[in-house]
Amino acid sequence: MNEFYLITRWIITALELFIVLFLLYCFKLHRFDLFFGGKKTLKKQSDHELHSCFLSSLATIVFYFSSGSLAHYILSLPFEPVQMRQVYYFALVCTGASFIVVLYLLHAIRGCSFSASTRVVTYIAFVLMLMNFAQLTLRGYFNNDLLFDIYGPIIVLGNVCIFLTLAKYPFYRLMESRLTKGAV
């Protein structure tokens, strides 16, 4: 099982790097229009999709790193095991809910519609939040390890699916630009 986690860690790291490069490339092209542009920058559906994917990628990267840091910090606190589980899973449920709310608010403030990939990311984040809530209830309050064996693989696969979904848009944009230039 450790090999599975090691391989998925490398996959997630590669996808994170690809998404960060996409964010930097989009920021270079559009400057602050991706953050602060008004409705005037959202003229076509492709503009909505670009902004939605940019906001989703940015929020995912920020929340992925912040929740990972928060989880490591919580695990280093001197709690009893049951208290540790309660605080740990509660923090993960809260960061999952915060991620969904922030994603919605970023789209509402920006005035762009949700792209298909953003919807998929939101649905997966909701499922992961429910999985953390189930662990909070079962392991934190009832001291039951019913989902313990499947919890880790589901969370890891959910994170891989989120990053694959986010990487799909920049990959298609890259291939589209290469096809129009005749490089492929």
Image (tube, rainbow, N blue to C red):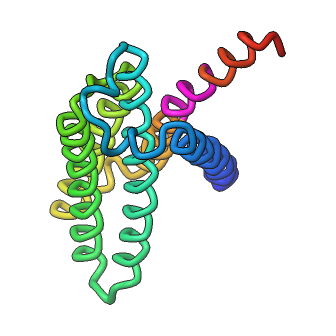
| In the image, residue 50 lies in the stretch drawn in magenta | no
Quarter holding residue 143 = bottom left
- Relative to 108, is 78 on the left or the right? right
Specify the farthest residue to the bottom: 78
Whole-percent x and y of residue 34?
Answer: 39, 39
**Does the stretch in magenta take in 171?**
yes
The residue lying at 67 percent from left, 46 percent from top is: 14
Instruction: Name the image quarter holding residue 114.
Output: top left
Q: Is residue 51 above or below residue 128?
A: above
Q: In the shown orientation, is residue 149 left or right of residue 25? A: left
| Residue at the image point whose x is 41% and y is 56% from the top | 62
Residue drawn at the location 21% of the way across and 62% of the way down: 90
Residue bounds of the magenta highlight: 164-172
Q: Nearer the viewer, residue 59 or 34?
A: 34
Q: Is residue 71 left or right of residue 24?
A: left
Q: Observer-nearest residue: 73 or 130?
A: 73
Residue 54 position, x and y percent, is: 43, 37
Q: Nearer the viewer, residue 13 or 158?
A: 13
The secondary structure that most of the magenta stretch takes on is helix
Number of numbered discs visible in the structure rendering: 0
Q: Is residue 158 visible?
A: yes
**What is the x, y in percent for residue 136?**
22, 57
Q: Splitting the image into 4 quarters, where does residue 55 fall? A: top left
Quadrant housing the C terminus: top right
Q: Residue at x 39, y 52 (%)?
A: 148
Question: Residue 61: x, y in percent?
Answer: 46, 51
Judge whether residue 134 can be spotted in this image.
no
